[in-house]
Image (tube, rainbow, N blue to C red):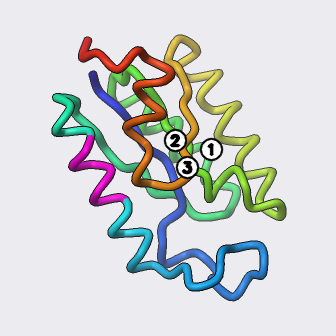
Amino acid sequence: MRVLMVGYEPDAVEFSDPALPPGLNAEKIHQGIKVALEDMRSRGWTAEQCFIRPDDQAGPILKQMLIAGSYDCLVIGNGVRSWPRHLPVFESLINAARETAPNVPIAFNTRPEDSGDAVARVCGGKPL
């Protein structure tokens, strides 16, 4: 199974935003992504990270990734979905995925570390 995880570039996140969990920082996000990628590899999957910024290029960047590769599942990170002021970015990602790869299932994590469980939930957890 080939998985694409999309989420904010940790260095682009405004950690002072009160909508974010206290104590969250770029190092913690990078560590969570590392754990997620290792978890997916241990399941026999290939996983890649697509970093975006909270701007109008998020959708086009995801489109480029989806066109360049063949993926069995797309994971959209919780940071993209749950940050209310960035709802347009989330919408652009959903629309980019729908337009570019309409048959690729979309999974949602609650934090980077549970991305593998999200893929297993949506895709059955078996390598294709």
Q: Is residue 73 left or right of residue 97?
A: left
- Work out whether residue 38 or residue 100 is closer to the camera in this orientation and state it: 38
| Foreground disc of the pair 1, 3 | 3
- Closer to the chain start, of discs 3 and 2, is 2
Graded by Cα atoms within 10 Å as few (under 14), some (14 to 19) or many (20 or more), the crowding at tag 2 reads many
Q: Majority secondary structure of the magenta segment?
A: helix
Which disc is residue 62 wearing? 2
Q: Position of residue 27 (x, y in %)?
A: 38, 79
Spatial separation of the CA atoms under disc 1 and disc 3: 14 Å
Which disc is residue 59 wearing? 1
Q: Is residue 97 left or right of residue 81?
A: left
Quarter of the picture containing the N terminus is top left
Quarter of the picture containing the C terminus is top left
Residue for badge 3: 77
Q: Position of residue 91 (x, y in %)?
A: 76, 41
Q: Residue at x 48, y 78 (%)?
A: 11
Residue contact at pointers 2 and 1, CB within 8 angstroms: yes
| Span shown in magenta | 33-39
SS at mark 1 in the image? helix
- Closer to the chain start, of discs 1 and 3, is 1
Graded by Cα atoms within 10 Å as few (under 14), some (14 to 19) or many (20 or more), the crowding at tag 3 reads many
Q: Amino acid at mark 3?
A: Gly
